[in-house]
Image: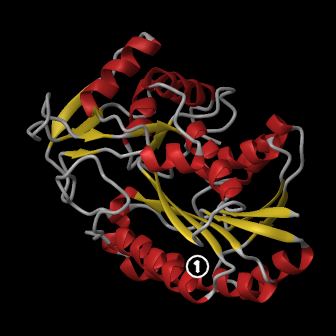
Amino acid sequence: MAVLVTGGAGYIGSHTCVQLLASDYQVVVLDDLSNSKYEAIARVEELSGKKIKFYQGNINDNDVLAKVFSDNSIDSVIHFAGSKAVGESVLKPWHYYHNNVSGTLVLLEMMREAGVKKFVFSSSATVYGKTETMPLVETMPTSAYSPYGQTKLMIEQILKDMAMIDKDMKISILRYFNPIGAHPSGKIGEDPNNIPNNLMPFITQVACGKLPILKVFGNDYNTKDGTGVRDYLHVMDLADGHLAALKYLDRQENNLEVFNLGTGIGYSVLEVIDTFEKVNNLTINYVITDKRDGDVDVCYADVEKAKKELNWSTKLSLEDMCRDSYNWQKNNPQGY
């Protein structure tokens, strides 16, 4: 029996594939390569010494999905596929609703027809909206301030409604905080198209000379040094969280559960820069610019539920995240 990983050539998907293969799962990947490269799959195979059955296609494509499910004995699905840039979602909301929401509906319908009942969904801490109450707990009210966040909320609601009527479904919704880092080998890592949207790839590209200077968005937040505070976790820890969620489905009493995946610790932008400089023995040139619309002062997770029910917690430090991120970038200055 195989695990279907949608978006498996992407940043989090590729690292999760490494961990799945290391745990002797058969892995089938569907990815349209719109924001990823096939080279990531080749390197996962190199790292693991095992093969992945790969299909290029979009989750909105019924024909491709039908082939994936007819060709393989799929036992469970880990769903990463989707567009993920908050700013782009504001400019192209129709694309985000079509790709993320419609695509998930097509995937769920194909699962229903194939009798596949185990589903792990890649959600996001953005569903908590702009609340100032910290830490963020899974039981808090949800809201969204971007089309991207709305798509995650909509999919979560779809899954809750499905779980209500199909008691055989087992669903884990994973709300990520801020994944950074890379595989310690330096073979796979985060490879954004164009100018990075996220802090760490921006830092690493400045460190390697690919970009001239880092922009720090705002220094007058209500934090200890004025820069925004976020819960950063190593992508390898996050990948292990998906394995823990997948295994949990077999013993899950309720047919739908929601879990935060984070460290439970908040670091400011300047703390991340300082740690990166110390770990890698270099200097990052940065400039303070205006705040971005929608950015909150502080955001970090309550992680007790994941610790208790998934038996999962992060093991890697901010120093590990900074070291592995730079190791990936300096070995792959132009990405894949």
Q: Residue furthest front?
A: 253
Relative image position of residue 296 (x, y in whole percent): 20, 51
Quarter in which the N terminus is drawn = bottom right
Q: Is residue 43 left or right of residue 326?
A: right
Q: Is residue 310 left or right of residue 22?
A: left
Describe the colour scheme in one phrase: secondary structure
Relative image position of residue 289 (x, y in whole percent): 16, 41
Which image quadrant for residue 32?
bottom right
Relative image position of residue 5 (x, y in whole percent): 71, 62
The residue that appears at 17% across and 53% down in the rendered structure is: 132
Q: Is residue 209 above or below residue 138?
A: above
The residue that appears at 73% across and 81% down in the rendered structure is: 111
Which image quadrant for residue 312?
top right
Can the viewer see residue 240 in this picture? Answer: yes
Identify the residue under disc 1: 104
Can the viewer see residue 261 in this picture? Answer: no
Which image quadrant for residue 184?
top right
Q: Is residue 134 above or below residue 79?
A: above
What amino acid type should be assigned to the residue bearing mark 1? Thr
The residue that appears at 63% across and 43% down in the rendered structure is: 240
Report the front residue among 329 and 229: 229
Relative image position of residue 119 (x, y in whole percent): 65, 69
Report the front residue among 264 and 309: 309
